[in-house]
Image: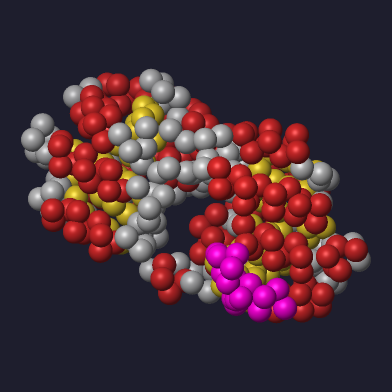
Amino acid sequence: MNKKVLLTATVQSHICQFHKPLVSMLHEHGYEVHVAARDNLAEKNGLKLDFVEKVYDVPFARSPKSTDNIRAYRQLKKIVDNGDYEVIHCNTPMGGIVTRLASRKARKKGSKVFYTAHGFHFYKGAPKKNWLTFYPIELFMARFCDTLITITKEDYRLAGKKFHTGIKHIHGVGVYTDRYHEVSDQEAMDMRVEEGLTSDDFVVLCTGELNKNKNQKVLIEAAGKLKKNIPNLRVLLAGNGPLEDELREKIQELNVEEHVKLLGYRTDLEKITPAVDMVVSCSHREGLPLNILEAMLCKKAVVTSKNRGHNELVLDGTTGHKVDADDVNAYVENILYLYNNEEVRKKYGENGYKKAQKYTAEAVGRELEEIYTA
């Protein structure tokens, strides 16, 4: 009989984006891998879930109030009860809650249940309502899994003190170094040409869903102030999302159409990141951001907001700079400083590359292997 693992998340794109290293490790150990999540791949510009053996379209919803999660529970329970899975590994808040509840019977029969917290909604500095809502839920649900896996040290320390389950820490979900790495000047130039950029452009990349949390409007406002001092500024916003129209209006309002470009959702950022001059992130909340790790592996300096995920990766004045998320002038000041100091950008890039080695797919794969074989 084949050894089988079920991976669950609220949406299938989560598995595509974050769990290929895990699936690779499981395949190496002879596991058959199934996925249960809501099919949202049509929204993700060709993202494919073609690296697992079976996929179930389960109607999880992100909102705890949605009745879709009741349907998801019923459907998932049948999958779990009939699946004879050695491990059921759940992700994302609602995917994790519904899966752990649906797996109670299977767990009593011997299935192990793992839950990876990609960044608790309660954290140092989080709104009080987050603590009142999400903390009690996660505290209660921890009893329904054998191992809770955290990807940030802050979450690991909190869970270790309060949660009644096994706690493990890993360095993120793993970034592939064969995709994200430094390239030659000619390769970088070829990448720029593909994006309609020139060698004289000063290119800033910002990646993430176009939503309130990712806070791209702050970078657009910064571009409006920077265009006089950096006339060759080109800001690339990669991603799609609910605020796309609002951000387009902001770009027009500030007259920065020449300087800010919306790229849409891209599955080929490895053809862009190595060619930019720096990477910026303005988000209010992060778990452990892949876009920053990808930048570091490509030896790029970064300017980020201060939050749990960025604080773990970015050493201020060593790999980049951190500022308050909504401080437009601070972004302007730090982007301008790095524009005028190429050697500092290179130094930050080298330092970031060294720090990122703990977070590669190979390194994280070894950490996951230890958890699965314990």
Residue extent of the magenta highlight: 57-74
Residue 73: give x, y in percent of width and height: 70, 73
Q: Is residue 288 left or right of residue 45?
A: right
Quadrant location, the C terminus: top right
Residue 193 visible in the snapshot? no
Q: Is residue 71 magenta?
A: yes
Q: Quadrant of residue 304?
A: top left
Residue visible at 76% across and 65% down in the picture: 101
Q: Is residue 9 above or below residue 322?
A: below
Q: Is residue 96 magenta?
A: no
321 vs 355, nearest the viewer = 321
The image position of residue 364, as x and y in percent, is 63, 43
- Residue 100, above or below 348: below
Residue placed most toward the observer, 148 or 318:
148
| Residue 261, percent from left and from top | 21, 54
Residue 210, above or below 55: above
Q: Residue at x 15, y 37 (%)?
A: 225
Whether residue 305 is visible here, answered yes or no, is yes
